[in-house]
Each structure stands twice: as C-alpha cells, then as structure tokens.
Amino acid sequence: MTFAKMFALLLAAGLFVGCRKSSPPTPAPTPVATTSIDDLLPKQAQPKLRTMKIYLGAETLDAELALSRDEEMTGMMYRTNILDTDAMLFVLPYNQRANFWMKNCPESISAAYINPDGVIEEIHHLEKNDTNGVEAVTTNIRFVLETSDGWFTRHHIESGTVLRTEKGSLPETFLK
C-alpha cells in the first residue's frame, strides 16, 4: 500500500469516526425539592409573648397575645407544665371557621372560639399531639382563647360569656 493510499484510508477513517453522532451524556437526576408541613413548623416553644388582662365574667387571666402569623402558628407548641393561670389569645386576621390542632403540643388544652363581638361561641377540648384539627361550627370566629385543659369548666365559663380586656371589649381593643 502506498503512502498516499494509506493516508487516504486514515483520513477517511478519521472522518468517519469524527462524523459519528455521539450520544449525549446522561444528565444527573434533578433533585426534587420536597417541603413537608413539618419543615415549616417551629422546632421549639416560643418565648413568652406580651400579655394583657382578659376578663371573663368574674374571672381574670393574663393572656399571652398571639398577634402575628408566626406567633399564631407556634401557639403553645412544645409547652409543658401549663398552669391554670396560663392562657393565650389568638387574634385572627379575619372572621373564619377556626381550625386548631395540637401537633407538637405535649399537653391537652381547652380552647374557646370567640366571635368578632367578643362572645364565646364554642368551647373545645384539644387533645395533646392530635394532628386532626378541631374545626369551629360557625364561620364567624375572630378570636381563640387557649387555657389549661378543663379551665372553662372549672371556672364555670360557658358559651355566651363576653370577654373584655383592660382596654375595653375585644373589638375595641383589637379591631379598630
């Protein structure tokens, strides 16, 4: 074989190999971002919130005020040793069918669902660590007051009781 023929054969082989379409590299799988509700929830109890005196008939509570979305979402999560004097008032952003659950709450509590006029509509037992929400019967709930378990029964507070604060009615205090 002459040099010219050998050169032509190598050139043809090189072109053949060089023109072959190569398979694209297999892309690495794209990780799927998974966010669960647990990723969004707080991991510890929130510090004690500012308080306000709440009057329910002859009874008085110094209730912590859950006013922001984060304070509301955290609520009494991770709290232990809830005393008869402990309470938290949730001021909801609009009238709604309140639905509270007890995820990450190691103690049962009682909750009063309160209408925009400051009147207790419903009182519920919330079982510790229960991830099923306790939904209000009505869509007209604007406030929720959480207390130690059984507080409303022990203090003879029932549906129809009007709540007031040291500044006036609940609507005067929070909805102006």
Image: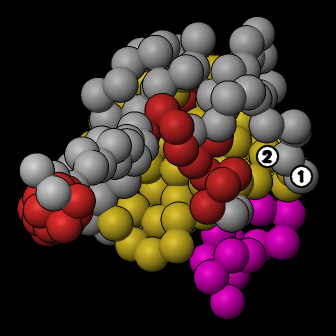
Say which of 108 and 131 sits in front: 131
Residue that protrudes farthest toward the bottom in the picture: 176
Instruction: Identify the residue under disc 1.
Output: 50
Q: Residue at x 65, y 37 (%)?
A: 42
Quarter of the picture containing the C terminus is bottom right
Which residue appears at 77% of the width and 62% of the height? Answer: 165
The residue nearer to you, when weighing 44 against 122, is 44
The answer to which image quadrant residue 97 occupies is: bottom left
Secondary structure beneath label 1: loop
Using residue 44 as the reference point, say whether residue 145 is left or right of it: left
Q: Position of residue 100 (x, y in %)?
A: 41, 40
Total numbered badges shown on the rendered structure: 2
Residue 167 percent coordinates (x, y): 84, 72
Q: Is residue 164 visible?
A: no
| Alpha carbon distance from label 2 to label 1 | 6 Å
Give the x, y percent position of residue 71: 69, 51
The answer to which of marks 2 and 1 sits earlier in the sequence is 1
Discs 2, 1 touching: Cβ within 8 Å: yes
Residue 17 coordinates in the image, percent (x, y): 16, 56
Residue 46 in view of the camera: yes
Relative depth, front residue between 31 and 153: 31
The answer to whether 19 appears left or right of 80 in the picture is: left
User: Based on the displayed image, in which of its 4 quarters is residue 133 positioned?
Assistant: top left
The residue tagged 2 is 64
- At 64% from the left edge and 69% from the top edge, which residue is drawn? 170
Q: Is residue 170 magenta?
A: yes
Question: Is label 2 in a helix, a strand or a loop?
Answer: strand
Question: Which residues, given as a range, are shown in magenta?
Answer: 160-176
Q: Is residue 24 above or below residue 57?
A: below
Question: Closest to the observer: 11 or 120?
Answer: 11
